[in-house]
Amino acid sequence: MTLLYVAAGISNPAGERLGQDRLQQVLEYVDAGNRIQSKIVFSDSIADAIVTEVNDGYDLVMIGASRESSLDKVLFGDIPAAVVRTSKCPVAVVRQPQKITGDLSWKVREWLPRLSLQERTEAYVRIPAQCPA
């Protein structure tokens, strides 16, 4: 799995640092160990950069749905829609939870202790063994 960050414009140290920070935030939240690679790409077109990257041998693209208004999408473009239209591989567009429940659910997740990947795996294996059929 590859986590891709596309920075606008040409390669520069500030864009590189911003990309690394954003990728690190996601990697810390996901807690997937070393199973996720990260990559930073610079391009004038974010959608074109994503499509170019994924057409190079990926099986699936997962991209977040934007929160912009319809007017913003018309004026500035809709990256998920452009990727869906031009990608040769399947694209899954993921929407964030609704504002009220979404914010609350993220807060609750911050309060709850997080299990490591090993602990989650062990719990997943134990649950069916302990539940009556």
Image: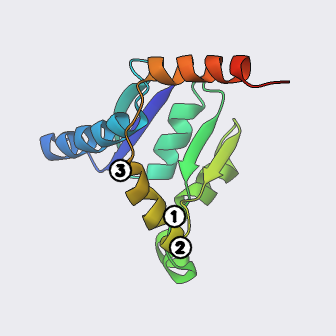
Tell which circle, 3 or 1, labels the residue nearer the N-terminal end.
1
| Whether residue 78 is situated above or below residue 91 in the rendered picture | below
Q: Secondary structure at mark 1?
A: loop
Seen from the viewer's position, the closer of residues 8 and 16 is: 16
CA neighbours of label 3 inside 10 A, class few (<14), some (14 to 19), many (20+): few
Instruction: Check contact, mark 1 vs mark 2: CB within 8 A.
Output: yes
Amino acid type of the residue that numbered disc 2 sits on in the rendered structure = Lys
Seen from the viewer's position, the closer of residues 7 and 102 is: 102
Position in image of residue 78 (x %, y %): 55, 64
Amino acid type of the residue that numbered disc 3 sits on in the rendered structure = Glu
CA neighbours of label 2 inside 10 A, class few (<14), some (14 to 19), many (20+): some
Q: Mark 3 and mark 2: span between their CA atoms?
A: 32 Å
Taking the spot 39% from the left edge, 17% from the top edge, the residue there is: 34
Position in image of residue 19 (x %, y %): 27, 42
Instruction: Check contact, mark 3 vs mark 1: CB within 8 A.
Output: no
Q: Mark 1 and mark 2: span between their CA atoms?
A: 9 Å
CA neighbours of label 1 inside 10 A, class few (<14), some (14 to 19), many (20+): some
Q: Which mark is residue 5?
A: none
| Whether residue 33 is situated above or below residue 46 in the rendered picture | above
| Residue at the spot of label 3 | 110
| Residue at the spot of label 2 | 73
Q: Which mark is residue 66?
A: 1
Position in image of residue 130 (x %, y %): 70, 20
Instruction: Check contact, mark 3 vs mark 2: CB within 8 A.
Output: no
Position in image of residue 41 (x %, y %): 35, 37
